[in-house]
């Protein structure tokens, strides 16, 4: 599987939090804003993202998704507002990171030609948008 294309320092600066790591295998960013909690885990050697958003005082997730990242993780700025957001491009959303054992190579764009971009904002509040 291709290695994730991203800049760790750029993410730390954007999210304003230092990730928990395990031998550089994964990076988990845990942040809270305006009553919401976001956990963003990136597995750089598998190019996998796991994102959960929940109310800070709840165990129930508002959003829980796993995706293979076939593009890049990059910081962008909204054209009209100049507000920074994270763009995670070319994502294939899957039920879990082990699904490739059943469905085949998730990076095969002939077999899986579709994908979405995930946009994340964290200031002043956490927001997530999926686009094609």
Image: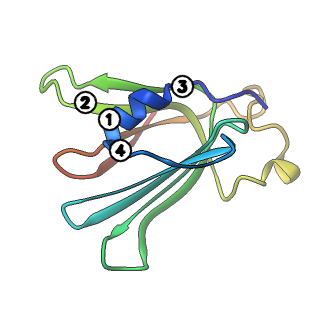
> Which residue is the site of mark 2?
84
Task: Find numbered disc 4 in the image and state the secondary structure of the residue it sits on.
Answer: strand
Eye-nearest disc, 1 or 2: 1
Numbered mark located on residue 72 in the image? 3
Among all residues in the image, which is located at the extreme top? Answer: 79
Q: CA–CA distance between discs 3 and 1? A: 16 Å
Task: Find numbered disc 2 in the image and state the secondary structure of the residue it sits on.
Answer: strand
Cβ atoms under marks 1 and 2 closer than 8 Å? yes
Cβ atoms under marks 2 and 3 closer than 8 Å? no
Eye-nearest disc, 4 or 2: 2
Where does the image place residue 89, in percent across and percent down from the top left?
A: 50, 29
Q: CA–CA distance between discs 4 and 2? A: 14 Å
> Which residue is the site of mark 1?
14
Rendered image quadrant of residue 32: bottom left
Cβ atoms under marks 1 and 4 closer than 8 Å? no
Q: In this view, does 57 lie above or below 90?
A: below
Q: CA–CA distance between discs 1 and 2? A: 8 Å
Q: Is residue 122 above or below residue 115?
A: below
Numbered mark located on residue 53 in the image? none
Q: CA–CA distance between discs 1 and 4? A: 17 Å
Q: In this view, does 118 lie to the left or right of 36?
A: right
Q: Which residue is drawn at 34% across and 48% down?
A: 128
Q: In this view, does 65 lie to the left or right of 97?
A: left
Rendered image quadrant of residue 13: top left
Numbered mark located on residue 129 in the image? 4
Q: How crowded is mark 4: few (under 14 residues within 10 Å), some or many (20 or more)?
A: few
Q: Residues within 10 Å of mark 1 (few under 14, many from 20)?
A: some
Q: Mark 1 vs mark 2: which is more N-terminal?
A: 1
């Amino acid at each position: 599987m291709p290695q994730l294309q991203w800049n760790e320092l750029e993410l730390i600066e954007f999210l304003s939090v230092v990730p928990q790591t395990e031998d550089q295998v994964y990076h988990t960013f845990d942040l809270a804003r305006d009553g919401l909690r976001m956990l963003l885990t990136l597995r750089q050697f598998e190019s996998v993202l796991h994102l959960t958003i929940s109310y800070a005082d709840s165990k129930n997730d508002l959003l829980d998704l796993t995706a293979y990242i076939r593009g890049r993780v990059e910081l962008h700025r909204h054209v009209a507002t100049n507000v920074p957001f994270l763009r995670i491009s070319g994502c294939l959303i899957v039920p879990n990171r082990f699904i490739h054992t059943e469905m085949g190579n998730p990076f095969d764009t002939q077999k899986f030609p579709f994908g979405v971009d995930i946009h994340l904002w964290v200031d002043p509040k956490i927001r997530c948008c999926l686009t094609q």
